[in-house]
Image (cartoon, helix red, strand yellow):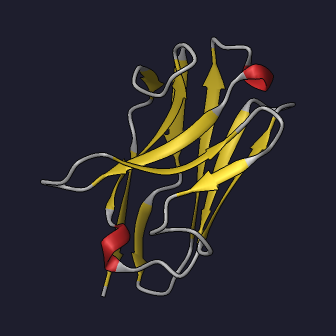
Amino acid sequence: VQLQASGGGLVQAGGSLRLSCAASGIIFSANVMGWSRQAPGKQREMVARISSAGATMYSDSVRGRFTIARDNAQNMVYLQMNSLNPEDTAVYYCETPKGSRWNNVHRGQGTQVTVSS
């Protein structure tokens, strides 16, 4: 399983970024996909998830600002991030559970998002 995240970078507060994740080695259309993030010295945080049918869920900290989407034809999952603030600075990871639970996941290498104030 490979989950290749891209699209991170440096952005000013209030700006936007769009993260992409290319997935391979899984039956993508059948898998729940998600994004998590980890800031230095902090625990990993679930950001957003999307079911195979397109149902979404978000953490309270990003709801209303971030949007997760998927393209099953291209085996891609996206995270549109708007109204970014410095608290969003973290490494963002694309994930999918190995089984039916999120306590054991396939996770890509991550992409750094840095928001300057």
Q: Quadrant of the C terminus?
A: bottom left
Q: Is residue 75 left or right of residue 12?
A: right
Q: Quarter of the image holding residue 41?
A: bottom left
In the rendering, at what x and y percent does residue 101 appear? 51, 22
Q: Residue at x 64, y 18 (%)?
A: 24
Q: Quadrant of the N terminus?
A: top right
Residue 38 sits above or below residue 88 on the image: above
Q: Residue at x 66, y 14 (%)?
A: 26
In the rendering, at what x and y percent does residue 8 appear? 46, 57
Q: Is residue 67 left or right of residue 81?
A: right
In the rendering, at what x and y percent does residue 48 appear? 56, 51
Q: Residue at x 41, y 85 (%)?
A: 13
In this view, the residue in front, 105 or 76, is: 105
Q: How many marks?
A: 0
In this view, the residue in front, 57 or 116, is: 57
Residue 3 sits above or below residue 36 on the image: above
List the single residue furthest toward the right.
73
List the single residue furthest toward the left.
41
Residue 21 sits above or below residue 75 on the image: below
Q: Is residue 36 left or right of residue 20?
A: left
Residue 84 sits above or below residue 56 on the image: below
In this view, the residue in front, 49 or 18, is: 49
Q: Is residue 92 left or right of residue 72?
A: left
In the rendering, at what x and y percent does residue 39 appear? 25, 56
Q: Residue at x 55, y 13 (%)?
A: 99
